[in-house]
């Protein structure tokens, strides 16, 4: 059994990689080509400053040992969410191998970082799931242009479903995606699902803008453009949804890690 301290060693690498076999099986079953690992960290409020500085130190440590996988950081008050995009099922094994290399090389340096991170934390939640890229709506004109060096605002709606509702809700998401394209909505909207984690089955819908104010303006425009069709889709989806969680994050470039090419 892993201790809390050992679990923390995978922070920003992938707290999930010790379950690599299970993830690989899930990926094969879903025939996924792209998916993501997520780590949600709740930090003690009086330790936020120390935590932020230690994460930056940890990123420098990853760069020093040339860890090859990126890790995007999102923040909402004392909650930090990390996302590691993977391009294929084979990357799960590669991620684990690279993780073990870092642990072997890190020695006392990594142990010190880990101890300080551990002292800052209240809780950790882990999840894994596919990016439903066939549903993504990324308009050529008007959508927010992602820049990993710039902070921005993100809103993620998590839909926790009733058992057996997966296929029905997938059809709803496709209908919504088709509507976004048909109406030529200028807001970028992405879709994904959670295969391993809490509150399964669940899906997410995310949108992004430069600032919170810009996002609010964009969302109002979307409502106007979709009109009654949006309400009709919402009404049809209600029978599948057990509850909804809305996450409002700021992407934090200063806490994100990108390997040098």
Image: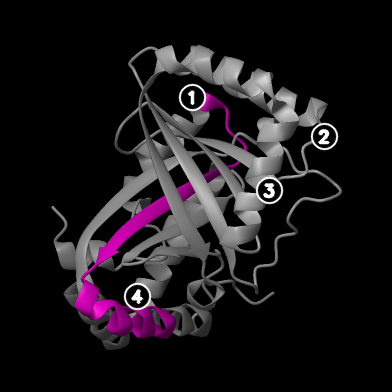
- Identify the secondary structure beneath mark 4: helix
Mark 1 vs 2, N-terminal side: 1
The residue tagged 3 is: 218
Mark 3 vs 1, N-terminal side: 1
* Circles 1 and 4: CB atoms closer than 8 Å: no
Q: Position of residue 25 (x, y in %)?
A: 43, 31
Q: Position of residue 81 (x, y in %)?
A: 41, 59
The residue under the point 31% across, 83% down is 49
The residue tagged 1 is: 29
- Identify the secondary structure beneath mark 1: helix
Residues drawn in magenta: 30-57
The residue under the point 49% across, 24% down is 29
Disc nearest the viewer among 3 and 1: 3
- Identify the secondary structure beneath mark 3: helix
Other residues around mark 1 within 10 Å, as few (<14) / some (14–19) / many (≥20): few
The residue tagged 2 is: 184
Q: Is residue 178 above or below residue 204?
A: above
């Amino acid at each position: 059994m892993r201790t809390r301290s050992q679990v923390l060693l995978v922070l920003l690498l992938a707290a999930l990689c010790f379950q690599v076999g299970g993830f690989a099986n899930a990926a094969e079953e879903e025939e996924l080509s792209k998916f993501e690992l997520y780590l949600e960290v709740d930090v003690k409020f009086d330790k936020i400053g120390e935590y932020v500085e230690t994460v930056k130190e940890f990123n420098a440590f990853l760069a020093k040992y040339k860890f090859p996988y990126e890790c995007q950081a999102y923040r909402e008050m004392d909650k930090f969410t990390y996302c590691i995009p993977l391009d294929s099922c084979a990357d799960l094994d590669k991620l684990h191998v690279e993780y073990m290399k870092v642990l072997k090389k890190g020695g006392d340096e990594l142990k010190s970082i880990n101890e300080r991170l551990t002292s800052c934390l209240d809780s950790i939640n882990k999840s894994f799931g596919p990016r439903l890229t066939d549903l993504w709506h990324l308009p050529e004109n008007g959508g927010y242009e992602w820049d990993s060096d710039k902070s921005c605002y993100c809103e993620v709606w998590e839909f926790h479903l009733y058992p057996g509702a997966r296929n029905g809700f997938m059809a709803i998401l496709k209908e919504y995606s088709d509507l976004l394209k048909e109406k030529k909505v200028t807001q970028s909207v992405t879709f994904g699902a959670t295969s391993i984690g809490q509150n399964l089955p669940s899906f997410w819908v995310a949108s992004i803008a430069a600032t919170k104010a810009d996002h609010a303006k964009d969302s109002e425009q979307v409502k106007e453009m979709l009109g009654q069709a949006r309400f009709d889709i919402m009404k049809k989806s209600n029978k599948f949804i057990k509850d909804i969680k809305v996450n409002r994050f700021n992407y934090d470039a200063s806490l994100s890690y990108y390997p040098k090419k």
